Amino acid sequence: MDATKVLSQDHRRVEDLFSRIEQASGPQQRQPLVEQLFEALSTHAEVEEEHFYPAVARAIDDEEMIREAVEEHHVVKVLLEEIAGMEADDEQLEAKLTVLKENVEHHVEEEEKELFKQARQAMDDRQLTAIGEELAARLMPEGMEQMAMATDGASAGAADGEIIDLTELTKDQLMERAKAAEIRGRSSMTKQQLADALSGKG
């Protein structure tokens, strides 16, 4: 999987965490999700700055775009540190999370519409795949990369006659497939609804 697809999939994972945080019923349910979000965003920014941005900077003639992306990461890191120092029931936590979400959404939109496009134009498949493997090793939980690749090539698998019984998968496995397929509203779906959506019945 090429680097832009790995990063896009991780963007969807972060979006899903924000959605689950918003739907949490109280501080006790929200706190572990906020901790997951902290880890996800921190790791995402770190691997982008270590592996993706340097490679893209060498390939494209737009250093300003890279500098802007790094600065946007800095803003997100400052907000994360502030949130990490707050109690779960702090009245300001929700406002901080809203500001964080807005900053992340802006950053993701610019990356996916502009930076990723330039990267795909300036770099060949071999380069993007090599970087993607480095990113996936850090960003994707064990087994998720294989699932993502399987989803990405689902049509090819179907052509070979492979039949996957979605009802035999766990809800977590269905959720990962739904993320990769960018199915809207997946965070509030039941296991059966996820299976139906993935099979095209939803």
Image (spheres, rainbow, N blue to C red):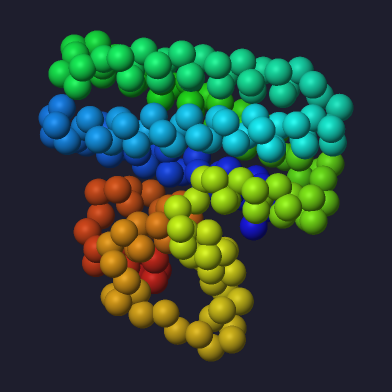
**In the visual, does 26 lie left or right of 94?**
left
Q: Which residue sits at x=69%, y=37%?
A: 52
Q: Horizontal placement of 55 versus 178: left or right? A: right
Which residue corresponds to the image point at 21% horizontal and 17% vertical from the top-left? 87
Quadrant where the C terminus sits is bottom left
At 48% from the left and 26% from the top, the residue drawn is 104
In this rendering, the answer to whether 102 lies above or below 10 is: above
Q: How many marks?
A: 0
Quadrant of the image for the N terminus? Answer: bottom right
Q: Is residue 120 visible?
A: yes
Q: Is residue 33 above or below residue 139?
A: above
Point out residue 119 in the picture as x, y percentages from the top left corner.
76, 40
The residue lying toward the viewer, choosing from 74 and 155, is 74
Q: Residue drawn at (46%, 43%), measured in percent from left and top?
A: 12
Viewer-proximal residue, 42 or 177? 42
Whether residue 202 is visible to the viewer of this picture, yes or no, is no
Where residue 142 sits: x, y (%)? Answer: 46, 58
Please tell me in which quadrant of the rendered image residue 99 appears.
top left
Q: Is residue 90 above or below residue 141?
A: above
